[in-house]
Amino acid sequence: MNRELVELATHPEALSAIVRSLGEQWTQHEMYVLGTHSADRTHANLLLLQRDKPFGEEEFPRDLNERIKTRLGEGDRKIDLDEAIESPFGNEISELTLPFYYAPEAEEKATAENIIVERAGVRFDFAGKTFIYDRLGLRPVDVNYKEESNNG
């Protein structure tokens, strides 16, 4: 009987039937949960490091000045700010790390341009895109974040 009870509460078809029986708010919640799950999977795939060669086939660079990429932070870029500023969280910062996936096509020698310190954070251009670092974190400007309303 336990298996039947578990399946009645967790099987996707059973969950869909429960959602349909509870009305529109639950349908909206289901869409949110499934959408979040899908977005998380897509984000994980964007960060996946492809490893086509077995360990040991990669040669160590002969040029000691060559930048060595690691599994974590592969291709990340350091954005040097012209001067130290106060972050939205109250810390003093003089640089930001731009994750590789935000500008994978950027040339190796690309640097940040048009750095503007605003009251709410820092805005800059990098590899043809505009980025902002504020209380919501570092992101491309074209990413829309829904502000939560305090109007109850």
Image (cartoon, grey):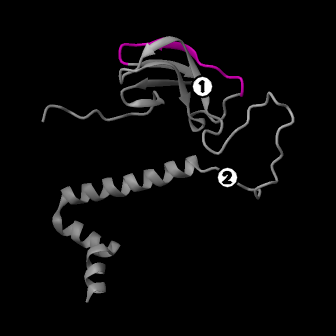
Residue 29, position as x, y percentages in the image: 26, 55
Query: In the rendered image, which quarter contains the C terminus?
Result: top left
The residue depicted at 61 percent of the width and 38 percent of the height is 73
Name which residue type carries label 1: Lys
Instruction: Residue 46 in the image: state x and y as whole percent.
Output: 56, 47
Taking 43 as reference, is 14 left or right? left
Q: Is residue 105 left or right of residue 36?
A: right
Magenta span: chief secondary structure:
loop
Residue 45 location, x and y as percent?
Answer: 55, 52
- Which residue lies at the image location 66% right of the left edge and 29% below the top edge? 106
Label 1's element?
strand
- Where residue 23 sits, quadrant-wise, is bottom left
| Residue under label 2 | 50
Residue at x 36% of width, y 34% of height: 145
SS category of the residue bearing label 2: loop
Q: CA distance from mark 1 to mark 2?
A: 23 Å
Residue 82 coordinates in the image, percent (x, y): 55, 10
Mark identifier at residue 78: 1
Q: Alpha-carbon neighbours of circle 2 within 10 Å: few (<14), some, or many (≥20)?
A: few
